């Protein structure tokens, strides 16, 4: 209760204390979870068994919770085993509801069939309205005919379909994969899913804190709305907009202890000693002459917007107001700071153009690219990062490594595809293997092609050297542990998205040490973005792991990050 005190209203604290004093424990003796469920067709590791025990204990105590193990430690298998444990040891036979992103829907169906084939599973997803109507009837009329129903966030938030999920069926357990999707109270997912009738909620996420501690409040309020009734205490405790720009380390300690009862988080280095090590190397790349020209031209073209932003910032610091928050999204490759207004939108657009310039000058209009393409050397020399990548790939190929290459931009993947083809990394005359030496996966890749390409890449003795992925499309539900090298051609605004990308390679089943190369354009917006991302990771580390020694460093987070990024490297 001491840790809870700063974050809940006084009347709520009083009610919790009163309920606790009046609580009479059940005389029913519950079977301890000493062994894994017989239904599970896998040999669970000890930390996974401990995860099942913890989830079952939370269920017994009536406390919804978060399994936040680092990506790659088998949260899906643990949650399936938890449902099997409820079936065998608590006589809770369902129905259970699993809600997940569309990208991992097939993976969930496959994992349920693989690890617990005795479960009766129904897939609740279709783009056809008639089929959706049939599924709605099946869910309601045949509740006893299935143990687990699996659907997507899009289907669950559909007004008509949600009515069925939330009012027609009482779910014993609702599992939210990628549960951080409910981290913002104003989103449809948070509001709609909070109305689903269920006994217990389990959130699965490898990133319990992504951007700020208000997200932590939103998740806890989703799990326990009767306890976390007001965000004011949270926002006051973690106000980074004060003039002092300080965060009290004692408050961060409270946040850590607040999470501890509801969250189980293990990292690979603690529990999976058999997993090979992961090494991350940041490579600072210079701008090419062509990139330097375009970078300066873009800044000169928007010099008026920059000066206007500087004036607004000075007025704000002198008490004259100002606006804009943090974390606006762009249509491609993540977003940038700034909250609203025409000036800030111009800066966001400029930031996106500068990011593209840091990747390759051919990404934006105005460059003179011949219709029949360009020679390979000209393509490579036009970008400092591509020139560095060219040298890295040659060495990796000669040494027998296999590569997973991520970019935020599908247009950059187009250039990388041309580059790999021109460098000869495509298929030669291999009659038994009708695939290129590289594959590509982005948001436009259909489900069948996605599965075929992943299987081809992971096939024993596969000659495929590289796999191109867009970071957000390929960062979930993709297992590529047959590769041993991950290259981030550019970084996401949210560092946890990059962490998810790395976990496609560094996960259970990996047999080789993994090397991650992160390419960053020196003295540019990318360098400032990386600094900001590292502060976000620092915040997550302090809250999730209880490390508060350097809490005051959070004070360096700026309200005017967007302006600072654009000005960085101008001189």
Image: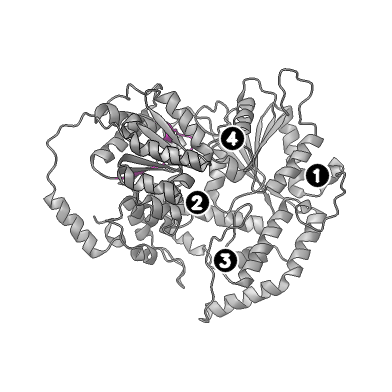
Callout 4: SS: helix
Whether residue 473 is visible here, answered yes or no, is: yes
Marks 2/3: CA–CA distance:
20 Å
Tell me residue 373's x, y (percent).
85, 44
State the image coordinates of residue 507 (x, y, percent, origin top left). Answer: 51, 33
| Closer to the camera in the image, 344 or 547 | 344
Mark closer to the chain start, 4 or 2: 4
Work out whether mark 1 precedes mark 2 in sequence or the reverse, and give the earlier one: 1
- Pointers 3 and 4 in contact (C-beta within 8 Å): no
Question: Which of label 2 and label 3 is nearer to you?
Answer: 3
Label 2: element kind? helix
Span shown in magenta: 64-77
* Residue marked by disc 2: 537
Residue 281's x, y, as percent? 62, 42
Q: Earlier in the sequence, mark 2 or mark 3?
A: 3
Tag 2 and tag 3, C-beta contact below 8 Å: no
Q: Residue beneath label 1, please? A: 380
Q: Nearer the viewer, mark 3 or mark 4?
A: 4
Q: Which structural element holds mark 3?
A: loop
| Residue at the spot 35% in from the left edge and 66% down from the top edge | 232
Element type where label 1 sits in the image: helix
Earlier in the chain: of badge 1 and badge 4, it is 1
Observer able to see residue 523: no
Q: Write the residue at 78% across / 40% down.
A: 418
Within 10 Å of disc 2 (Cα), the crowding (few <14, some 14-19, many 20+) is some
Residue 530 vs 443, above or below: the answer is: below
Closer to the chain start, of discs 1 and 3, is 3
Please say whether residue 75 is one of the residues in the magenta stretch.
yes
Q: Which residue is mark 4?
A: 447
């Amino acid at each position: 209760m001491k840790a809870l005190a700063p974050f809940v209203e006084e009347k709520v604290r009083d009610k919790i204390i009163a309920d606790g004093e009046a609580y009479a424990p059940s005389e029913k003796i519950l079977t301890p979870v000493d062994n894994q469920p017989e239904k599970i067709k896998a040999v669970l590791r000890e930390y996974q068994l401990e995860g099942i025990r913890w989830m079952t204990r939370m269920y017994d105590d009536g406390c919804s919770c978060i399994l936040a193990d680092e990506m790659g430690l088998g949260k899906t298998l643990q949650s399936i085993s938890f449902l099997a444990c409820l079936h065998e040891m608590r006589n809770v036979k369902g129905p259970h509801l699993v809600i997940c992103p569309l990208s991992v829907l097939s993976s969930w169906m496959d994992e349920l069939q693989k690890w617990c084939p005795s479960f009766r599973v129904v897939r609740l997803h279709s783009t056809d309205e008639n089929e959706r109507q049939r599924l709605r009837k099946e869910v309601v009329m045949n509740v006893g005919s299935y143990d687990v129903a699996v659907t997507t966030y899009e289907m669950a938030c559909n007004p008509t379909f949600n009515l069925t999920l939330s009012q027609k069926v009482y779910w014993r357990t609702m599992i939210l994969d990628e549960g951080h999707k409910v981290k913002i109270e104003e989103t449809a997912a948070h509001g709609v899913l909070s109305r689903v009738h269920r006994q217990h909620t389990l959130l699965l996420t490898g990133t319990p804190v992504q951007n700020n501690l208000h997200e932590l409040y939103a998740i806890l309020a989703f799990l326990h709305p009767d306890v976390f009734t007001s965000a004011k205490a949270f926002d006051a405790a973690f106000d980074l907009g004060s003039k002092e720009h300080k965060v009290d380390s004692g408050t961060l300690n409270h946040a850590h202890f607040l999470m501890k009862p509801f969250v189980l988080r293990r990292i690979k280095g603690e529990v999976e000693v058999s997993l090979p090590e992961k090494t991350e190397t940041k490579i600072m790349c210079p701008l090419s002459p062509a990139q330097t020209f375009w970078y300066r031209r873009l800044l000169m073209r928007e010099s008026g917007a920059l000066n206007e932003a500087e004036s607004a910032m000075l007025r704000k610091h002198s008490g004259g107001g100002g606006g804009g928050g943090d974390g606006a999204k762009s249509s491609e490759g993540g977003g940038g700071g700034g909250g609203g207004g025409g000036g800030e939108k111009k800066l966001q657009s400029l930031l996106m153009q500068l990011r593209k310039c840091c990747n390759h000058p051919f990404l934006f209009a105005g460059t003179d690219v011949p219709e029949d393409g360009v020679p390979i050397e000209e393509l490579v020399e036009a970008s400092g990062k591509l020139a560095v990548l060219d040298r890295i790939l040659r060495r990796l190929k000669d040494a027998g490594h296999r590569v997973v290459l991520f970019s935020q931009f599908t247009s950059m993947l187009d250039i990388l595809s041309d580059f790999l083809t021109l460098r000869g990394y495509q298929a030669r005359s291999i009659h038994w293997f009708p695939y290129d030496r590289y594959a590509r996966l982005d948001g436009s890749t259909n489900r069948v092609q996605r599965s075929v390409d992943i299987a081809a890449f992971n096939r024993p003795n596969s000659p495929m050297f590289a796999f191109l992925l867009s970071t957000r499309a390929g960062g979930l539900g993709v297992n590529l542990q047959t590769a041993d090298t991950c290259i981030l051609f550019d970084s996401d605004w949210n560092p946890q998205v990059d962490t998810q990308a790395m976990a496609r390679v560094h996960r259970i089943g990996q047999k080789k040490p993994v090397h991650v190369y992160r390419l960053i354009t020196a003295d540019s917006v990318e360098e400032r973005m990386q600094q900001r991302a590292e502060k976000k990771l620092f915040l997550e580390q302090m809250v999730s792991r209880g490390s508060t020694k350097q809490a005051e460093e959070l004070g360096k987070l700026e309200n005017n990050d967007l302006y600072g990024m654009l000005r960085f490297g101008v001189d």
